[in-house]
Amino acid sequence: MKTSVGVPREIKPREGRVALTPSAVAELVAEGCRVCLETHAGEGSGYPDDAYLRAGAEILDSARAVYAAADVLLKVKEPVGPELELLEARHRLFSFLHLAALPALTRQLCDIGLTAIAFETVVDHATLPILQPMSEIAGRVAVQVGSHLLHTAQGGRGVLLGGVPGVGRGHVVVLGAGHAGGCAARLASSMGAAVTVFDRNPQRLGEMQRAAPNINARYANSEDMRKALRSADLLVGAVLIPGAAAPRLLSREDVGGMEDGSVIVDISVDQGGCIETTRPTDYDDPTYVEEGITHFCVTNMPGAVPRTASQALTGALLPYLKQLVRDDWRDVPALREAVNVEAGQVVHPALLD
């Protein structure tokens, strides 16, 4: 009997990504999988139902039908609201989950009794292959959005990050020099901003220091971060401990030391945020003001560029999905060790700490 892969339409606000592109569907069908998509699942990324039909997929008229047909449930973002009522113990759920920041969802998945494998905890040869491309996109989006929010019309300080001759450039502070933080720092530097990036990994700091002459890579400590914050026009939070809650690096008092009209973009919001004033938002209502600072803390930042993000995500997850549809998928360490919840229990070490 063929393993059935189900791809429902994402229902988070303004989430246009889809977990499989038509070309990936064609590969799975060629290897003997049944692939079912909810109608219009790919339209936000520019893929109409006809493209999936030509690739060999079945198009079903409701999420309920997709969940009923699927053995492996493939999603971009964690299940919410009515989706939870459709999950069954027999399902293998493969998705971004970020359970460290979502204890209620963790309990619900345990109650259902399914097996939940998180994209963000797939580790292969000391890398995070599925999370990495989304982190890179989020890092770039953070700077693009942050630069826009600095415009006076958006309530910002009226600062152009790159400045112009004879005028000082804007200052961007980045917490974390991993894939998200590194991409944020590089984009900000290419725009001409003065960039200060903090991390505790000497190799990453070296890479950042060599990346551009206007990037200043600093060892992360509270005193130096607070000093940098006082002159920051844009602060990007990009701290990650795989699978675990993000550490809280800056307090409300620290944020209050920034100039009014400055901007915070906390990419770490998925894992609870690395700044005390962070709270989750979505693209229907993406910003709020705390301590005079505009905050952008959308939990699905790559959803703003769904075409690019869907292609990158599909390319990264497809090799692992091809293993997950097999009966012996647990023989693949990257998948076995990425299980977050199984048979009513939380099993991932990062969630047990």
Image (cartoon, rainbow, N blue to C red):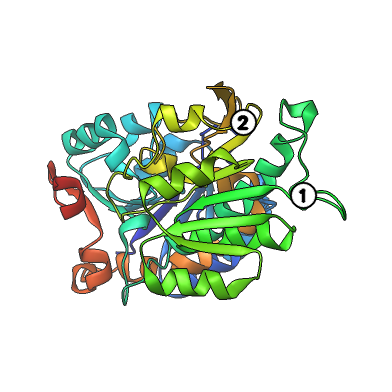
Secondary structure of the residue carrying numbered label 2: loop
The amino acid at mark 1 is Gly
Secondary structure of the residue carrying numbered label 1: loop
Q: Earlier in the sequence, mark 2 or mark 1?
A: 1
Which residue is painted at 19% across and 68% down in the image? 330
Residue 168, label in figure: 1
Question: Which corner quadrant of the image does residue 160 belong to?
Answer: top right
- Quadrant in the picture for the N terminus: bottom left
Q: Name the residue carrying label 2.
A: 259
Residue 317: image x %, image y %?
Answer: 44, 65
Which residue is painted at 52% across and 46% down in the image? 228
Nearer-the-camera pick, 285 or 156: 156
Image-based side of 71 in relation to 294, left or right: left
Label 2: how many Cα within 10 Å (few below 14, some 14–19, many 20+): some
Mark 2 in CB contact with mark 1 (< 8 angstroms): no
Q: State whether residue 127 is above or below residue 66.
A: below
Residue 126: image x %, image y %?
Answer: 31, 73
Nearer-the-camera pick, 204 or 279: 204
Which residue is painted at 17% across and 38% down in the image? 110
Q: State whether residue 269 is above or below residue 218.
A: above
Instruction: Report if residue 291 is visible in the image.
Output: yes
How many tags in the picture?
2
Which residue is painted at 52% across and 52% down in the image? 174
Residue 329: image x %, image y %?
Answer: 24, 69
The amino acid at mark 2 is Glu
Instruction: Report if residue 279 is visible in the image.
Output: no
